Image (cartoon, rainbow, N blue to C red):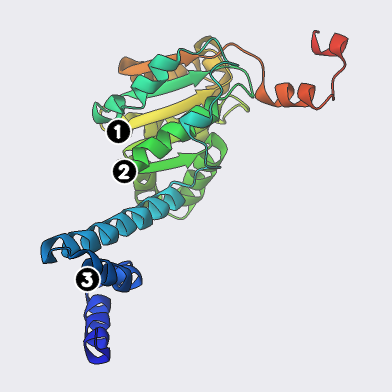
Amino acid sequence: MTMILQERLQSALEELGCTRIPEVLHHYAEEASEENISYLEFLDKLLQEELAAKHDRFIKMKTRLARLPYHKTLDEFDFTFQTSIDERRIRDLATLQFVEHQENLIFLGPPGVGKTHLAVALALEAIARRYTVYFTTPHDLVQDLQEAHQTNTIKRKMRKYIKPNILIIDEIGYRKMEDTAAHFFSQIVSERYEKGAIILTSNKSYGAWGDIFGDPVLATAILDRLLHHSSTINIKGESYRIKEKKKAGFFKQDEAQK
C-alpha cells in the first residue's frame, strides 16, 4: 500500500467516523494478499470489525448513563447459595419479555441476599439489547425531584425517570418517606404505568408499605399500579456478606448459627 493511498484512506476513514478500521486495515490487507481473499470478503471483515467496535462503544456509553452501582452479571450470581430462587425463572426474565410488555419486576427479601445483583444483571442484559436503563435509589430519586420542584424544573426532571425502558429503584423501605416524597414516588409509578418497566427491590413485604409511605391509601394506589402487570421474586436466604465473613472466620460457629 503506497504512502499516498494510505494517507487518503486514513483521511476518508476519519471523515466517516471509523475508529476500528484504521487499527486493523494493515493486518487485513496483508491477510487478503497472502490468502487471496476476495474484495468482498476483505470489505466484510473490515466492516464487521467497525460494527463490533461501535457496538462496544454504545454498550459502554449506555452502561455509564444507566448509573449502575457496579457491574455484575447473571453468570456471577450464586444460585446454589440462594436456593429459594428458581434459576430457570430468572433466566426466563433475562429474555426481557417483561420489558417488551412494559411489566414490572419486584425483588423482595432481607438485605444482602442478591436483590440488587439480580436487578443489575438484568439491566446489563437489557443494555446489551439496546434498551435504555436508569438506576436510582428512593432517596436519590426523591431528593432530585424535590430540588427540581423548588427550581420549577420538575417536568424536565421527571422525563429522566419516565423515558428509560427500565427504571430500577433499589431498596424501598430503608427509610420512611415524607408526604411530598411519597407523592413524587407515586407520580413516577403512575407516569410509567403500562408505558415502561420498573425493577424494584425492597426489604419490606407489601403489607409494610403503608408505613414506608406514611399513608396506607397512597401505598395501596402505588401497589395497585406496580402489581397490575408484574412478577414478584421472594428471596429467602442468608446474606452473601455474612457468608463471606463466615468464610473469612469473622464468626465463630456457635455465633453463626444464632
Cα distance, mark 2 to mark 3?
Answer: 50 Å
As drawn, the label of residue 33 is 3
Foreground label between 2 and 3: 3
Which amino acid type is shown beneath numbered disc 1?
Gly
Query: Would residue 78 be visible to someone looking at this image?
Result: yes
- The percent coordinates of residue 141 (x first, y second) are 50, 41
Which quadrant of the view contains residue 191?
A: top left
Which amino acid type is shown beneath numbered disc 2?
Lys
N-term mark: 3 or 1: 3
- Are the residues flagged by discs 1 and 2 in contact, CB closer than 8 Å? yes
- Left or right of residue 235, residue 92 in this image: left
Which quadrant of the view contains residue 229?
A: top left
Q: Choose between 213 and 208: the one closer to the eye.
A: 208
In which quadrant of the rendered image does the C terminus lie?
A: top right
Q: Choose between 30 and 154: the one closer to the eye.
A: 30
- Residues packed near mark 3 inside 10 Å, few (<14), some (14 to 19) or many (20 plus): few
- Residues packed near mark 1 inside 10 Å, few (<14), some (14 to 19) or many (20 plus): many
Residue 37 sits above or below residue 192 on the image: below
In which quadrant of the rendered image does the N terminus lie?
A: bottom left
- Left or right of residue 62, residue 111 in this image: right
Q: Which residue is mark 1?
A: 196
* Residue at x 21%, y 61% (from the top left corner): 47
- The percent coordinates of residue 241 (x first, y second) are 70, 26
Cα distance, mark 3 to mark 1?
Answer: 51 Å
Cα distance, mark 1 to mark 2?
Answer: 8 Å
* Residue at x 56%, y 23% (from the top left corner): 78
* Residue at x 66%, y 15% (from the top left corner): 238
Q: How many marks?
A: 3
Query: Would residue 19 be visible to someone looking at this image?
Result: no
Q: Which residue is mark 2?
A: 163
- Are the residues flagged by discs 2 and 3 in contact, CB closer than 8 Å? no
N-term mark: 2 or 3: 3
